[in-house]
Amino acid sequence: MARRDAAPVAARLINEGQRALRGDVEHRRRLITANAGALSGTYEAGYLERLHQEWPE
């Protein structure tokens, strides 16, 4: 492949990579939104504070 022929291929790879990354972000955002609050109420009030007290300094 001649060097001048590589430029369009590289540009397409960059564009496709950017498109894929944007798609992944949108997909992750939809998953986060769909699952937001799914664990609400799983841990009782004060759980995290009690857990921290058990950790050594």
Image (tube, rainbow, N blue to C red):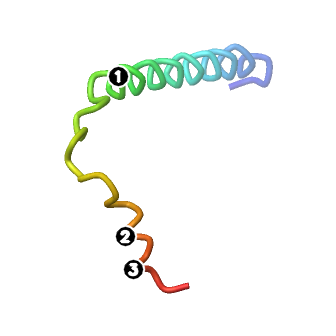
The residue tagged 3 is 54
| Closer-to-camera residue (6/26) | 26
* Labels 3 & 1 near each other (Cβ < 8 A): no
Judge left or right: residue 21 versus residue 53: right
Q: Residue at x 20, y 47 (%)?
A: 42
Position in image of residue 28 (x %, y %):
40, 27
Position in image of residue 38 (x %, y %):
22, 34
Judge left or right: residue 9 versus residue 24: right
> Based on the displayed image, in which of its 4 quarters is residue 15 positioned?
top right
| Closer-to-camera residue (18/50) | 50
The residue tagged 2 is 51
- The kind of residue on which mark 1 rests is Thr
Identify the secondary structure beneath mark 1. Answer: helix
Q: Which is more N-terminal, label 2 or label 1? A: 1
Q: Nearer the viewer, mark 1 or mark 2?
A: 2
Q: Nearer the viewer, mark 3 or mark 1?
A: 3
The residue tagged 1 is 33
Identify the secondary structure beneath mark 2. Answer: helix
Q: Is residue 15 above or below residue 49?
A: above
Identify the secondary structure beneath mark 3. Answer: helix
* Labels 3 & 2 near each other (Cβ < 8 A): yes
- The kind of residue on which mark 3 rests is Glu
- The kind of residue on which mark 2 rests is Leu
